[in-house]
Amino acid sequence: EKFNVYKVETIGDAYMVLGGAPNVCPPSEGAEKTAKFALAALEAVKNFRKEDGTTVLIRCGLASGPVVAGVVGKAMPRYCLFGDTVNFASRMESTSSSMKIQVAELTHSLLQSSNTNFHIKKRMGQDGLPGIPVKGKGRVNTYWVHGIQEFNDSFVSIKEDELDPAQDPASRPAEVMVGVEPPPDEASHAGANFPV
């Protein structure tokens, strides 16, 4: 509610939200809302400790574009999303890194035109070139959202020295699928954000 995003569903340990529907808004606003939600999710787990003292980590991924949405089912009707944008957001989450927010190129453009001054950097592949390979898409340019510049106290920018570019995505804990999710060995995951 705080960010005016719509929780679509929880899929396993992934949490999926939508920024541009069912209440339609300009695309840059939808991207902005989901990015702020993802930043808040990272901040929320930053100091969280499980009973045994271990930390919970999440990863996030955002993609923007058209989706088909509708209510499916009679006994238990649900608002569902379908389409390439949903799959792409899932890929953004699954190829993201622990405690990072990865966004697709269109989402990056929308965030750049939003009312918020996001701190964003282009992601470089392991070969030192821009972009990463994404299943079904080939090599695509993606970006890291590190925080909000000139932000208020409710958002804290992730410091460059807190980021571990060498960390293997498979070693992460929780995730937010926008995407956010814990690593495969963790019990809890967070899901995906899909600005439309």
Image: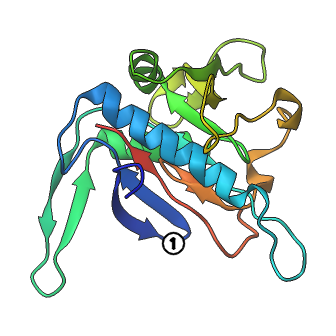
Q: Which residue lies furthest to the front in this view?
A: 153
Q: Residue at x 47, y 52 (%)?
A: 192
Type of the residue with mark 1: Gly
Q: How crowded is the residue under tag 1: few (<14 C-alpha within 10 Å), some, or many (20+)?
A: few
Q: Residue at x 45, y 29 (%)?
A: 137
Q: Residue at x 33, y 39 (%)?
A: 85
The x, y position of residue 185, in whole percent, is 76, 69
Residue 120, by quadrant, is top right
Residue 75, by quadrant, is bottom left
Q: Which residue lies furthest to the left in this view?
A: 74
Residue 39, by quadrant, is top right
109 left or right, relative to 39: left
Circle 1 SS class: loop
Q: Residue furthest bottom?
A: 75
The answer to which of 100 and 91 lies nearer the viewer is 100
Would you name the residue on which mark 1 appears?
12
The answer to which of 40 and 109 lies nearer the viewer is 40
68 left or right, relative to 134: left
Q: Is residue 48 visible?
A: yes
148 left or right, relative to 67: right
90 left or right, relative to 52: left
The x, y position of residue 184, in whole percent, is 71, 65
Q: In which quarter of the image is the C terminus?
A: top left
Q: Is residue 91 visible?
A: no
Q: Which residue is drawn at 82% across and 32% down?
A: 165
The x, y position of residue 112, in whole percent, is 46, 16
